Image (cartoon, rainbow, N blue to C red):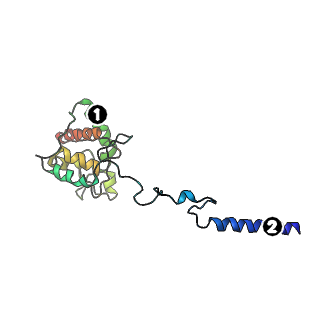
């Protein structure tokens, strides 16, 4: 009989505890819900995260850029008079780093020579498998340094953006390396 009474009392207390917590906004049992009824920013609520300040530099060294300004830079760099100038001089260190980064990120799809396959794209193993990357050395003489820089940073319709993987100075080093590849026959 005592066991039945204890069991009934336990079930009653459990139901009472659950009923008392139904209006609470937490999934954890809470008896005091005062903290939920205050003016505060709720996590995961739309607008609860502040926008990053444009021009700020994050802890990894990357600059927060205006997403609306992304395409205006590329358009500006197509015209050689308004193009972003290359701030990096093509010295031995720049060319060596550019060679390393180009071979790592660019040559896989674009190749290092002017060779093209029957479809007119760079003669690389990736393009043989169906990729459509042009031979970069054939196209780049027509583009400004700033255009190549921003194309590497933001990517294109098929080309992925490499801005996350390659720092600004390294992208300029890649541009310097591409300019030396253009001079080779």
Residue 114 seen from this side: no
Q: Is residue 173 above or below residue 29?
A: above
Name the residue: 24% across, 39% down. Answer: 177
Residues 124 and 50: in front is 50
Of pointers 1 and 2, the one earlier in the residue sequence: 2
Name the residue: 19% across, 45% down. Answer: 146
The location of residue 2, given as percent across then percent down, is: 88, 66
Q: Nearer the viewer, mark 1 or mark 2?
A: 2
Name the residue: 19% across, 50% down. Answer: 139
In the picture, the quarter occupied by the N terminus is bottom right
Residues 95 and 58: in front is 58
Residues 103 and 31: in front is 31
**Helix, strand or loop at mark 1:** helix
The quadrant in which residue 165 appears is top left
The quadrant in which residue 18 appears is bottom right
Residue wearing tag 1: 96
The location of residue 150, given as percent across then percent down, is: 24, 48
Calculate the distance from the C-alpha at mark 1 to the C-alpha at mark 2: 79 Å
The location of residue 145, given as percent across then percent down, is: 19, 43
**Helix, strand or loop at mark 2:** helix
Residues 177 and 168: in front is 168
Dot 1 alpha-carbon crowd within 10 angstroms: few under 14, some 14 to 19, many 20 or more: some
Mark carried by residue 161: none
Name the residue: 86% across, 66% down. Answer: 3
Residue wearing tag 2: 7
């Amino acid at each position: 009989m005592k066991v039945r009474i204890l069991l009934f009392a336990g079930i009653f207390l459990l139901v009472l505890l659950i009923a008392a917590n139904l209006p609470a906004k937490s999934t954890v049992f809470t008896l005091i819900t005062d903290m939920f009824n205050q003016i505060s920013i709720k996590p995961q609520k739309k607008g609860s995260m502040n926008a990053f300040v444009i021009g700020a530099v994050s802890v990894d060294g990357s600059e927060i850029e205006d997403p609306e300004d992304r395409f205006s830079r590329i358009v500006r760099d197509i015209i050689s008079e308004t193009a972003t100038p290359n701030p990096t001089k093509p010295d031995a260190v720049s060319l060596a780093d550019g060679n390393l980064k180009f071979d790592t990120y660019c040559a896989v799809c674009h190749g290092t020579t002017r060779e093209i396959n029957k479809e007119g794209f760079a003669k690389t193993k990736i393009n043989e498998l169906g990729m459509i990357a042009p031979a970069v050395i054939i196209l780049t003489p027509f583009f400004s340094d700033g255009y190549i820089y921003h194309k590497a940073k933001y990517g294109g319709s098929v080309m992925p953006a490499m801005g996350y993987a390659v720092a600004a100075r390294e992208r300029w080093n890649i541009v310097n390396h591409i300019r030396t590849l253009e001079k080779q026959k």
